[in-house]
Image (spheres, helix red, strand yellow):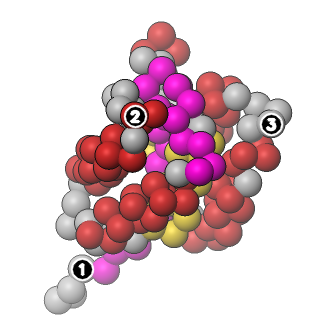
Amino acid sequence: MSQSLVKNYVHIIFSTKHRNDFIDESIEEELFAYISTICKNLSSPSIKIGGTDNHIHILLTLSPKYALMKVVQEIKAHSSRWIKTKGRKYQDFFWQDGYGAFSVSQKHIFATINYITNQREHHENEDFKTEFINILDKYKTDYDEKYLWD
């Protein structure tokens, strides 16, 4: 075959440092649009971005040109610098060090989009820690909870 054909859907999840509430509804649209541009510039277009005050979900198509770790690193670095320019309220903004990333099959794309779209409603009944542990368990991901939270 003379060309490489790749289609990798990835659901990325990470929180603000110590799950501090920074991403309020007044800035989330602009933040999500900014992150979408970062993804596009990394040839990994976002499909859906959402979250709540203390964490974010990104569904994207991962480019074969970049390692997942690099994409997440660039998203966090650039968006963190950007949000700090939005006023005093955000000057202490940081993302957590780690992240979760999970492959999504083509047949589960719409369910994942809906899940990300409805994050604020979802978190009326469940906190981020519970949600993230449930996702880790769903994907049968080995973890030590003492290293999950910073």
Element under disc 3: loop
Percent x, y for residue 146?
48, 10
Instruction: Decide if residue 3 is in sight here.
Output: yes
Q: Is residue 146 left or right of residue 77?
A: right
Element under disc 1: loop
Q: Which mark is residue 124?
A: 3
Residue at far front of view: 88
Which residue is nearer to you in this view: 40 or 87? 87
Amino acid type indicated by mark 1? Ser
Q: Are marks 3 and 2 in contact (CB under 8 Å)?
A: no
Q: Quadrant of the N terminus?
A: bottom left
Residue 135 is inside the magenta segment? no
Q: Which residue is mark 1?
A: 4
Residue 15 is inside the magenta segment? yes
Percent x, y for residue 110?
67, 69
Residue at far top of view: 146
Name which residue lies at 59% across and 43% down: 24
Q: Which residue is mark 2?
A: 88
Alpha-carbon distance for marks 1 and 2? 46 Å
**Residue 87, placed above or below residue 36:** above
Which residue is nearer to you in this view: 75 or 24? 24
Percent x, y for residue 68?
30, 52
* Residues shaded magenta: 5-26
Alpha-carbon distance for marks 3 and 1? 43 Å
Q: Quadrant of residue 64?
A: bottom left
Q: Is residue 145 left or right of residue 63?
A: right
Few, some or many residues within 10 Å of mark 2 (<14, 14–19, 20+): few
Q: Comparing marks 1 and 2, which lies closer to the viewer?
A: 2
Percent x, y for residue 35?
40, 58
**Residue 32, placed above or below residue 85:** below
